[in-house]
Image (cartoon, helix red, strand yellow):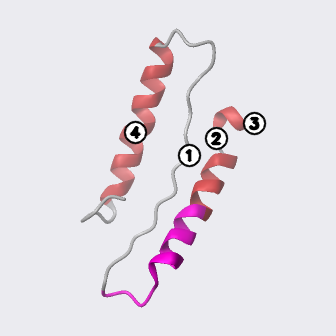
Amino acid sequence: MLPQTGKEVEIVEKRLRQAIINSNTKSELPFPVDFAIGSAFWSNKMNKSTEKIIEEADKKMFVDKRNSAYSR
């Protein structure tokens, strides 16, 4: 949950991904760390339930997980 964000969430996602990439290059772990992100925008002006918004974000997370470089 990132309150008071809209398109800015894409910037946050890019920063998180870059931080993980940087961490993996310096890590002494025998495996890379990865994660999947799913985001969806919600406003109280929208006619969507929070359950529907969470469902949208969940679907995006699974797409991201399938597209992960480490899942191939």
Residue at the image point whose x is 45% and y is 85% from the top: 48
- Circles 2 and 1 in contact, beta carbons < 8 Å: yes
Residue situated furthest right in the rendering: 72
Quarter of the image with the N terminus is: bottom left
- Disc 2 to disc 1, C-alpha distance: 8 Å
In the image, what residue type sits under mark 1? Answer: Ala
- Circles 3 and 4 in contact, beta carbons < 8 Å: no
> Regarding mark 3 in the picture, which secondary structure is present there?
loop
Mark toward the start of the polypeptide (4 vs 2): 4
Which picture quadrant has residue 43? bottom left
Residue 15: x and y, percent? Answer: 36, 39
- Circles 3 and 2 in contact, beta carbons < 8 Å: yes
Which picture quadrant has residue 40? bottom left
Q: Nearer the viewer, mark 2 or mark 1?
A: 1
Q: Name the residue under label 1.
A: 36
Q: How many marks?
A: 4
Range of magenta residues? 45-58
10 Å crowding of disc 4: few (<14), some (14-19), many (20+): some
> Regarding mark 4 in the picture, which secondary structure is present there?
helix
- Circles 4 and 1 in contact, beta carbons < 8 Å: no
Tell me, for residue 68, which label it has, or none. Answer: 2
- Disc 3 to disc 2, C-alpha distance: 7 Å
In the image, what residue type sits under mark 2? Answer: Ser
10 Å crowding of disc 2: few (<14), some (14-19), many (20+): few
Q: Name the residue under label 4.
A: 16
Residue 53: x and y, percent? Answer: 48, 74
In the image, what residue type sits under mark 3? Answer: Arg
Q: Mark 3 points at which residue?
A: 72
